[in-house]
Image: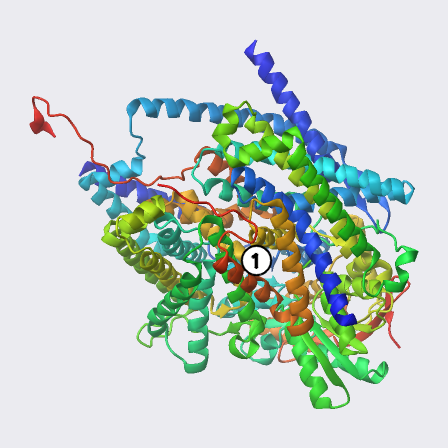
Amino acid sequence: MGIVKELKKGALISLWFVFLTFPVMVIKVDPIARTVVWRWENALYMAVGTFVVYYIAQFFLKKKENQKEASEEKGLNHSIIHKILQNPLQRNIFVGVLAVAAVLFPQVLSAYQTNVMTTALMYVVLGLGLNIVVGLAGLLDLGFVAFYAVGAYTYALLNHHFGLGFFTVLPIGGLMAATFGILLGFPVLRLRGDYLAIVTLGFGEIIRLVLENWGEFSQGPSGISDISRPGFFGVDFDLQSSIIYTYYLMIILVIVTIFVVNRLQDSRLGRAWIALREDEVACQAMGIDKRKTKLVAFSLGAFWAGIMGVMFAAKTTFVNPASFTFLESAIILSIVVLGGMGSIVGVVLGALILILMPEYLRALSQYRMLAFGAILVCMMIFRPQGLISNIRRTYTFKKKTTNSLSK
Amino acid sequence: MKLTVSGKFLSTAACVMLALSAPALSVAGDTIKFGIAGPHSGDLASYGLPSAAAAKLVIDKVNANGGINGKKIEILKEDDVCKPEIATNTATKLVSSGVEVVLGHICSGATIAAMPIYKDAGILVMSPSATSDELTYSGRYPNFFRTIAPNAMQSPAMVDFAINKLGLKKIAIIHDKGDYGKPLAEGAKTYVEKNGKGQVVLFEGITPGAMDYSAIVQKIKESGAEVVIFGGYHPEASKIVSIMNKKRLKTKFVSDDGVKDDTFIKVAGEDAEGVYAAGPQDNSANPLALKAKEEHKAAFNSDPGAFYEGAYAATMTMLNAIEKAGSTKLEDLKKVLQSEKVDTPVGSINFDSKGDAIGVGFSMYVVEKGKYVVAK
Amino acid sequence: MDYFIELLFSGLTRGSIYALIALGYTMVYGIIGLINFAHGEIYMIGAFTAFIVATVLSIYGFPLVAIVIIAGVAAVVWSSSYGYTIEKIAYKPLRYAPRLSPLISAIGMSIFLQNYILLAQTSDFLPFPRLIPDFPFMEPIAHIVGSTDLVILVTTFVVMVVLTFIIKFTLIGKAMRATSQDRAMATLVGINVNRVISATFIIGSGLAAIGGLLIASHIGQINFYIGFLAGIKAFTAAVLGGIGSIPGAVLGSLILGLTESFATGYVSSDYEDVFAFSLLVLILIFKPSGLLGKAKNEKV
């Protein structure tokens, strides 16, 4: 009986989708030649496709529900990765394997793969930077790309005009971005939630527009080309080794970032951010300086974006304002949310997935972005808390039992 | 301990598997690998897809006739979404998979970002559309060629036409803030100021994709300009001319190659009448151009889009160079490209030492009865 | 003075355009607190449906009036259906998820819809048929206000009045207000919250479709990417006026339109968006919940 009912429902939904997609999928008009092509076969594909997808989705939803019940029975549901990280021996093995894989990567795989991986690692750092602002401090920032742009242009301009090297500008770029973070932070301190979101979005656009229009300063939309790649004590690399060198540099930067962000999270400041995120009023009542805490969150987040901006300019050897659009901010935000807000492991995983996915989806060519959008939606539906949800340090009170020594 | 070994073993095994599946480095196989790079998705896809179509048509024809020097041509198509940072990945991927020549990239920014990678690998790159002066004039990219004339030639063509032919002195220069339109507009401005015959009464950028350009049209009217010179692409141009007509503004409209596109006439309809645009020299009498268009119609049942002819010509000249040189080494190819003229849809062309096509210049066109015709 | 009036009207037209899209944003936000990034795409789909239907009808030789009505109805029906379906697929499962998850889902949906239209139709710009003819009586002032501008202004006004009526006096409107004030309480008094949310998406999407039809015939072209910028601008306008407030969305849109128009006219269009966003920041600094938004007092 259940099957018949299910089938009926599936058929109805397919019919609905055939109706929904009818004008766009079936009709194709040429307004100049004034011809109409009716592509009825598409309606058929749509019907069959929806029918199949519906059952697959149902299957997964059922599975998700069962899992939820199961995990509720077991109590806390920690992901495997957290279990590994909690056990010191397993953690060391895990980190060791990761380190070996990271070192071997460019030796084993082609320059293209290494280049793509470097890009993904850059987004890891960007994600971790935004994670401070969004994940820890709970300030929704839709204009994060502005700081990325500040860093990139700092290096591009200093390199172009004064010939400053990569390592000199790396801290300067970070500090410039952090300064801009504070500049943005001041006026928006009073705003909350979605008002903050739109103002940061506006800020991002303003930075891009200024770069586009102020030609004397930034060379406008044509951008700045021929920026030096990262150097190594005056050694000139050919392209192949430069790609590998940049990759290792990025690995070091990622490690430093993870280390710093991890320490920050557990510091007094980190706890203040989390408190701020959970409840602003209560947080103030506890004597935390809201202003200062927010500003520090903005500037520290921006700092990493600035560093990555310098890296971006050095890796691409070319910057123009078109690289710093809102879509970029949206992708970085997606990394943080998809990975799991506040969770470092999650953000790393999120960045790797979101950046590597479109690269490897190239096989799908023109269906690539379609698949990207669909996957984003599906991931959110099936794991709204992100791939790896953050685990807050919890202390469970246990009544003393007879053999209390075992724990 | 046991776990360590198996873990490492697993990761090594995984690495090896991945390595095996990764494209092998430049295998000199029995095909000639022909790379195509440009935006094939995203908002600028309409500029990239026609080039890919052109290359496919030419190459299919050559392959049907047995290929070049006994080798078939294999197309490797990569999307760069017109973004510089993606373009470097695209370029590295093409180089890694051993392409021998590349048709692309489409946008100037993406091309400039990708060029160092091709240069390092010694691969010939030919673009049907990247007009940035820097690509050929800076001398930094000896492996770059193009079948479109650079901005440096286009701005003066537009200005001279407006001042000398139309006899209009008060000029409003509008651009789309993009990496194609703005340099063109700036070039036009400096040229007018240096030339001294005309006067720039307005110089402004508009936001591409905005829903309404009434305010800027009012401003053009207020400035008392007799002619508008627009640097940018056709979607914005058609919006501006349609609003100019709605506001009953009779100011002449002179624009660039990005507007000299049949899509402009289709979209702007009656409003397009009387619009002037610079474009590659008149090819309408060129039988090859007509044939190329027919082929597109037959294959895709639609009119070709932007840069189609340029891409068609670029593919033809590159394949010709490979055939004549008997190799795909950059130096050999360059020699053929620079010395030998090839009949293509954009005319009979060869290339100068900078990489610009000789014989590709600009004519001015005007829309008359729904068609671009050469302006007298 | 003429110049001023011209700029005033071009600002009003632009503002009305933003308003039609901003209303959908603000309604959805008011009910479920979600920034529906896919709303711009709904507008784009409305415009595409109108384009397809209108072109087919004109090829089969229907009279202009019939074309306008049928294309308009089709655009509203299909856009609303899309809005309804999107809510069911991408937002409903996330109703009790962390706050940012539906936002990412919306961004994903927006990317998906853009590429869906790109693949199913074309990447090219297409000419939108002229659905609004030049009215002869407008000819003397055509250089200031065109016929399409007039139609847009009037339509926005009518839509705004009808919408206010629906929200204020009908049963579904009352249910909407109740839901936006307190969802749990609304459920308690017997309101089917899911149905109210669906209705909000349907009405908001229908408005976006009307916007799509009007704007496309105003600028005469469409493409799969038009929704993105329109969406961001309309969202800005909605926040400016106080997101969640319907008169606020209209006011915010008009202010945004006028600012852009005057900034272009008297300063430079290079920085028109910079002006728009700076104005937004300024207003939000002094009124952190927008012009007509209600300040929420947070309690511990």
Q: Is residue C93 left or right of residue C113?
A: left
Q: Is mark 1 on a helix, strand or loop?
A: loop
Task: Report which quarter residue B192 is drawn in.
Answer: bottom right
Up-down: is B357 above or below C288? below
Which residue is depicted at the point 65% across and 43% down? Answer: C42
Q: Where residue A170 sits: x, y (%)? A: 35, 69
Q: In this view, does B302 lie to the left or right of A334?
A: right
Disc 1: which chain?
Answer: B
Could you tell me the amino acid type at mark 1?
Answer: Asp
Q: How many labels sit on residues? A: 1
Which colour scheme appears in the figure? rainbow
Task: Report which quarter residue B44 is drawn in.
Answer: bottom right
Q: Where residue A40 sits: x, y (%)? A: 76, 32
Which residue is depicted at the point 80% across and 84% down? Answer: B169
Q: Where residue A69 sits: x, y (%)? A: 37, 22
Q: Where residue B12 sits: x, y (%)? A: 31, 45
